[in-house]
Image (cartoon, helix red, strand yellow):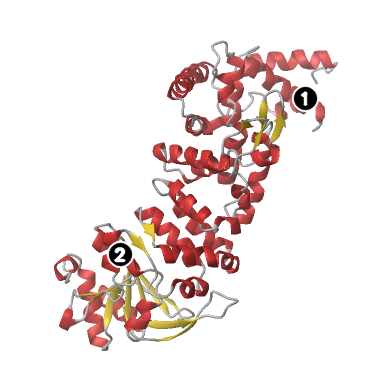
Amino acid sequence: MNFKEKLDQNSIFKIVGEAGQRLGLPTYVVGGYVRDLLLERENKDIDFTCVGSGIALAKEVSKALGKDVPVSIFKNFGTAMINWRDYELEFVGARKESYRSESRKPIVEDGTLMEDLERRDFTINAMAISLNQEDFGELLDPFNGQKDLKRKNIQTPLEPNVTFSDDPLRMMRAVRFAAQLNFDIEADTFFAIQDNAARLKIVSAERIITELNKIIETPTPSYGFKLLFAGKLIHEFFPEMVELQGVDTVDDKSHKDNFYHTLQVLDNVAKVSDDLWLRWAAILHDIAKPATKRFNPKVGWTFHGHEDKGARMVPGIFKRLKLPMDDRMKFVQKLVRLHLRPIALVKDEVTDSALRRLLFDAGDAIDELMMLCRADITSKNDKKVKRYLENFDKVERKLQEVEEKDQVRNFQPPISGEEIMSTFDLKPSKIVGDIKEEIKEAILEGKIKNNPEEARGLMHDIAKRMGISDK
């Protein structure tokens, strides 16, 4: 199969091929770009391999592209990179690798193109297209990657136990590609994942979370999580989620399987939002259910307080998984803590005060919170689901009305601590905080409007009651 016509549509392939020709280096496009070309998927990352120095090839290409196109060189890895237009071009010399059992860092030596392709993770990524003058555009497919693409199949070029033992991160990548492409993992390859799952311990948390986030960002992330669970991979780095799985029964009373419920909530969120952190909130919204599970003979299984305990667990999970400990973590924590609140507001007699408090506590995350709450309705009873969703419609309309009237989303109390101290000649103290807190509570309860005039009037009333006079 020849792809000359397709390659001719992008001048970079001719430029790289001619650079390789000038240096006497056989040059090829390899890996993911070739795979996606066959799948007719766009890919802006192009990997080039030559039999010789990839750094020398990159420098030659950089010169051909012009002086305004610099090349980044990574001598320790023997690679180089060029950012050109919208493309990220990576250059490396063909190499072979060997591994020590205690490390996933390979001993790298120069190799042939065949040795370079066989060291790659999967057959669908072990194809190359020649950029050489004599056979420009010719596909090289020594491990039947085309066949596996047609069969929607993930398998390794070499014996999978060797592939995964050498580089355990490839097990995560197998699941990630299966999830992204909606492919199956070939049986022997999957058995090897199960057999080598414990090897994931030698992989850094940063590398694991990169692959996990890519799985979470797929259209149906539950598929990837089911593979991670069946392959025993998630057991190695996310035991809290594993503990969600299973159903206990006492006196013929059971609870739902919270692992599969969580995956359904995650898929429901994925249908309405691409936000990675909203998806993480879906993953963690019930994470504390195993820790809070109790059996009550009268009502059955309960999980009282799982939202608060779950929120307290979020920072520790984020830290261990090397997820960001910034506003993104706080956003997830907030949604976990609040995810039951809107459900309590589905009654017709809900008060404006309760709505104001939810708006105040959720702030700018109110829309995402309502998405999560809708996604959390996973009953098989269609009438029940319809009733809950209609009730959420009512809550959202009421929230909008209250917000337009009272403007309490992310509101800052109209009286600052500095103004209280200045008015009554006070130093920073508990009294100042108490006055400010009472003003905030009065606004949320609807006793006064959210404006400085009414807040100042209340401030003076509170101070008078406390026996504090103006300075």
Which amino acid, by three-letter code, is at mark 1?
A: Asp
Report if residue 57 is visible in the image.
yes
Q: Tell me the tag on residue 220.
A: none
Relative image position of residue 285 (x, y in whole percent): 58, 38
91 or 59: nearer the eye? Answer: 91
Which residue lies most toward the front here?
Answer: 252
Give neighbour class at mark 2: few <14, some 14-19, many 20+ (Cα, 10 Å): some
Which residue lies most toward the right here?
Answer: 467
Alpha carbon of mark 1 to alpha carbon of mark 2: how far? 68 Å
Residue found at x 63% / y 47% = 243
Which amino acid, by three-letter code, is at mark 2?
A: Asp
Q: In terms of sequence position, does the residue under pointer 1 or pointer 2 come before the other?
A: 2
Which label sits in the foreground, 1 or 2? 2
Q: Tell me the tag on residue 148.
A: 2
Q: As displayed, is residue 268 above or below residue 232?
A: above
Relative image position of residue 338 (x, y in whole percent): 60, 31
Q: Is residue 458 left or right of residue 146?
A: right
Residue found at x 45% / y 71% = 160
- Quarter containing the C terminus: top right
